């Protein structure tokens, strides 16, 4: 597997963006190499998406190219999607190893499909919902670590904001919509966010009706356009996760996911179920305000 395979489409897009600004401003490879204290070959590999981007190099080049705040934000979004471990270095002590691996894989996937029978999938959680979950699961975590854990969860979602890849299929058990993590106002915000996601090209949200026969645990499948693996499955448990790459096991989880998708409502029905859940929480939130 080449380095560019590890970086995926985001690494190539990041490199192309850096090359665009360098050429636009009339700088040579040598000019850019001096800024990051490297060689012209290093800059060339970075611009081709063949070298792991270091955050410090990206920020130094952004400053040298005098990029606007909006242009810098675009680079930051692409950097977060490269799966580069350095981009998440300051979260290392609050991030389980299995989750670090998942973050790297998500950044290079073409499709992410998740079935979640317990909570709203992490890639679709609003900040207040995520905070309530973290506080529930990590009761001894200091407030500063809670803040950083929640920030990491929010950063994972940046890859779904550019209209490209990966694209997300989220299949959620209907019971999840009525399981409170936080006060009713938080659940109102979360339901509205899910409704917005149903209307985007990037996310496809489907609801599995109550009583449907489904696995009792979450399942993720990741599909890749190129690279070493075309598809892997990921099964999370309380203290870790299992990655499935062998064909026989992949076939098993693929069948499980197909059965879950077959049991789920279509887009119109899923939207209607989400609106019912929103109305439920809005009623409870209104009652809270009247107290």
Image (cartoon, rainbow, N blue to C red):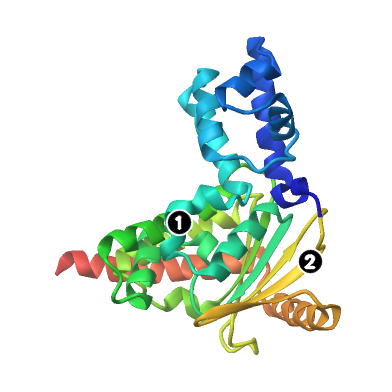
Q: Please tell me in which quadrant of the rendered image residue 169 appears.
A: bottom right
Residue found farthest to the right: 247
Crowd rating for badge 1 (residues with CA inside 10 Å; few <14, some 14–19, many 20+): some
Q: Are the residues flagged by discs 1 and 2 in contact, CB closer than 8 Å? A: no
Which residue corresponds to the image point at 82% horizontal and 60% vertical from the top-left?
228
User: How far apart in space, not on screen, are marks 1 and 2 (Cα)?
Assistant: 25 Å
Q: Which residue is mark 2?
A: 231
* Residue 68 appears left or right of 231: left
Rendered position, 24 above or below 145: above
Between 211 and 58, the one nearer to me in the picture: 58
Rendered position, 233 above or below 54: below
Between 79 and 262, the one nearer to me in the picture: 79
Quarter holding the C terminus is bottom left
Which residue corresponds to the image point at 56% horizontal and 46% vertical from the top-left?
80
Q: Secondary structure at mark 1?
A: helix
Q: Residue 224 at what x, y percent from top left?
A: 78, 58
Circle on res. 152 = 1
* Residue 254 appears left or right of 128: right
Kindly tell me whether residue 74 is visible in this rendering.
no
Kindly tell me whether residue 66 is visible in this rendering.
yes
Q: Earlier in the sequence, mark 1 or mark 2?
A: 1
Q: Residue 274 at what x, y percent from top left?
A: 51, 67
Q: Residue 277 at what x, y percent from top left?
A: 45, 70
Residue found farthest to the left: 291
Q: Please tell me in which quadrant of the rendered image residue 247 appears.
A: bottom right
Quarter holding the N terminus is bottom right
Between 36 and 195, the one nearer to me in the picture: 36
Crowd rating for badge 2 (residues with CA inside 10 Å; few <14, some 14–19, many 20+): many
Which residue corresponds to the image point at 48% horizontal and 74% vertical from the top-left?
119
Q: Secondary structure at mark 2?
A: strand
């Amino acid at each position: 597997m080449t380095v560019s395979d590890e970086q995926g489409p985001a690494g190539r897009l990041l490199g192309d963006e850096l090359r665009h600004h360098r050429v636009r401003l009339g700088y040579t490879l040598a000019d850019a190499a001096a800024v990051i204290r490297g060689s012209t070959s290093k800059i060339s590999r970075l611009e081709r998406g063949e070298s792991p981007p270091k955050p410090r190099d990206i920020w130094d080049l952004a400053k040298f190219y005098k990029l606007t705040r909006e242009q810098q934000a675009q680079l930051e979004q692409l950097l977060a999607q490269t799966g580069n471990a350095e981009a998440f270095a300051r979260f290392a002590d609050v991030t389980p190893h299995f989750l670090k691996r998942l973050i790297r894989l998500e950044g290079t996937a073409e499709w992410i499909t998740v079935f979640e029978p317990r909570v709203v999938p992490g890639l679709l959680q609003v900040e207040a919902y995520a905070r309530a979950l973290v506080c529930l699961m990590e009761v001894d975590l200091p407030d500063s670590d809670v803040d950083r854990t929640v920030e990491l969860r929010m950063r994972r979602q940046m890859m779904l904001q550019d209209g490209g890849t990966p694209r997300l299929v989220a299949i959620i058990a209907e019971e999840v919509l009525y399981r409170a993590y936080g006060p009713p106002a938080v659940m109102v915000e979360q339901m509205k966010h899910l409704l917005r996601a149903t209307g985007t090209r990037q996310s496809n949200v489907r609801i599995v009706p109550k009583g449907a026969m489904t696995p009792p645990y979450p399942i993720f499948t990741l599909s890749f356009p190129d690279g070493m693996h075309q598809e892997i499955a990921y099964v999370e448990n309380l203290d870790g996760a299992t990655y499935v790459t062998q064909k026989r096991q992949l076939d098993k989880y693929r069948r499980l996911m197909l059965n879950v998708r077959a049991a789920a409502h279509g887009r119109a029905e899923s939207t209607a179920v989400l609106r019912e859940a929103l109305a439920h929480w809005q009623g409870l939130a209104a009652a809270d305000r009247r107290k």
